[in-house]
Image (tube, helix red, strand yellow):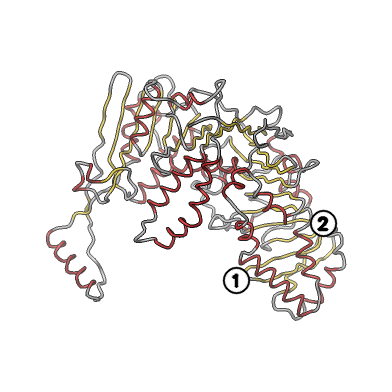
Amino acid sequence: MEPSQKRKLGFGLGIAGAVALGASLLYFFPLKKDTTPAVSTTATPAAAATPDLGTAARGGIIDSTLPDDIDNLGSGRSPDLVVNTTAFTTLWRDILKAKVAKTIVNEDLLFYYEESESHLSLKGSVKRIAFERDMTVLDDIFAYVLDRPLKLAFWKGYHGRLNHFLGITNRSGLTDVMTKLGEMTLDDKQLAISSTKEINGKKVNVFKLSYGAGDTLYFYADGDDLIFSSSTYIPHPDAEMRKKLFPESDLALKDGEKHALLAGANFLSFGYQFFSPDLEKVRFVFGKDGWESSLFSGKDMEDVGLLAAVPVYPAACSFAPVSMERVEKILDLPEDLKGKFSEEVGVCWYESSDVFTPLFVFKGKENFKPAQFKSVFETVTGSFEKGILTDAEKTEREAQIERMNNGESVSDLIRATKFVKPFASQEKATANSWKLSREVSSPWGTYEASKSKNVEDMRSRRFFVVTLAQHKEFMFFSPDDKLVDNAIAALDKKYPNAGDLMKNGEFPLFLLDPSRLGKMMKESMLDSLPMAEESLFRDSLTTKLFPALAKLDKEKPVIAILNKAKDGMWKEVEWRTYSSR
């Protein structure tokens, strides 16, 4: 597909990625294993009192502000991830105790982070300075900070990684150390006094430690606290800023709790939280009973019967409230097409299909006329197909390729300037159903090109049959037409539906079958890494990742129930197993 067409079709798949990632992360930090969950329901008094971790106006596909615009970190742009821990050195080891992590990840992950280039460079710089000065001051600080109660705020950088940070810890026991550091900076290439700050009427030195390939750590004393950060652009955390970054209502650790993590939904969903603004942030807490998870949501889930329209045995499903107003704006729908669907949307992946071919399920409202959406479907799907060359251009191009094969330099290889138009859509209608399909060629398509009557005009060896369909009061969309057919059959009771797996009429927020999900991911990765072109990556996956995914076969399928909050807007996430075999 052309880039513009990929973006159009991709926005919907992006919503899928958003909710799927949220489900996966919540599952990594589940409630008590094989017991009835007991998540803390400490309420947030008011939404305005919590940090804006999930505001859709920042990042992703909507906001044009670059993530590396760090001038307003802390004071203006809320963090993407906040950590409150009793000891940072134990955090990674405790993450490995999470349910799925414990199954598929070994201590290699821990060693990877502990032996990463940045970590070793920082540690090496500290060791070098300490050795040359015959002092252990910096070494003491390094070990002291990581083994103390610590609060950290992270912001994502340009590439989406959390490479901007601000940390605060108590410096009791290091009172004399900061004075000694001033003496060490006089002639050291890596350690220097970067600047001074005036805090409460007193000037303090800001130390700069350079390490690795251009990495820098800044730190200074603030009364009884040690402040450190990745950049001088991050402002000093005064009392007001600390309340905003580290709200006690969300991050306070109770007796027996070691770590609390607060992640913005916008960060977890790569920016697609724009489409589901009611889902704002996720909290993970590690205590004596393991990891617990909860979700901050401004809206309770409403069961509109989507499960009856979802084919049985999905690898993963999410049912989330979506802002149809925002979707309608992105699609630029005319007024007569707006307000046709409920805000609850289902998106599911299946082992028989692919990662990028999920099934979307919508429920229509009154006066629902699906044929009105034909023009929208034809606008956002399809792409120009095979390039068209004249006989003279073909002859010249063949000659150019032959010269290139003989080692000659060819400056401008003749390329097509005209292309076969997108294939016509095919419409079918019955008394209570309507279906619109279009063949779209793609290297990752679900069919071989030889199975299409348009094979001569396709520009790829495979193709999708992108399908939009309505049956009764539901509408379905998928790049895989077979999933749409299965959904229609499920709605007619000719095929089992996902609701048949639920007990007592449960309506889940997420549904995950780790075994099927692992197999689907494996097949998708193999398809995207042909052996002839990507042998190195493929070998790495075969030896490293696939054995870990195979361990998912041991995990039982689970559903996540979003319980109503007792007060405030934090809702416990309750995980329950179900049978899908």
Mark 1 lies on a secondary structure that is loop
Q: Within 10 angstroms of label 1, few (less than 14), some, or many (20 or more) residues?
A: few
Residue under the image location 45 percent in, 44 percent down: 519
Labelled disc at residue 213: 1
> What residue would you read off at disc 2?
170
Drawn side of residue 473 relative to residue 20, left or right: left
Q: Image height check: is 485 above or below 424?
A: above
Q: Image height check: is 499 above or below 203?
A: above
Q: Amino acid at mark 1?
A: Ala
State the residue in front, 292 or 109.
109
Q: Where does residue 576 sit, x and y in percent of width and height? A: 60, 31
Q: Mark 2 or 1 closer to N-term?
A: 2
Q: Within 10 angstroms of label 2, few (less than 14), some, or many (20 or more) residues?
A: some
Q: Splitting the image into 4 quarters, where does residue 114 fall?
A: bottom right
Drawn side of residue 70 relative to residue 127, left or right: left
State the residue in front, 460 or 493.
493
Residue under the image location 50 percent in, 51 percent down: 547
Mark 2 lies on a secondary structure that is strand
Q: CA distance from mark 2 to mark 1?
A: 29 Å
Q: Where does residue 421 sit, x and y in percent of width and height? A: 23, 46
Q: Where does residue 146 sit, x and y in percent of width and height? A: 75, 59
Q: Amino acid at mark 2?
A: Asn
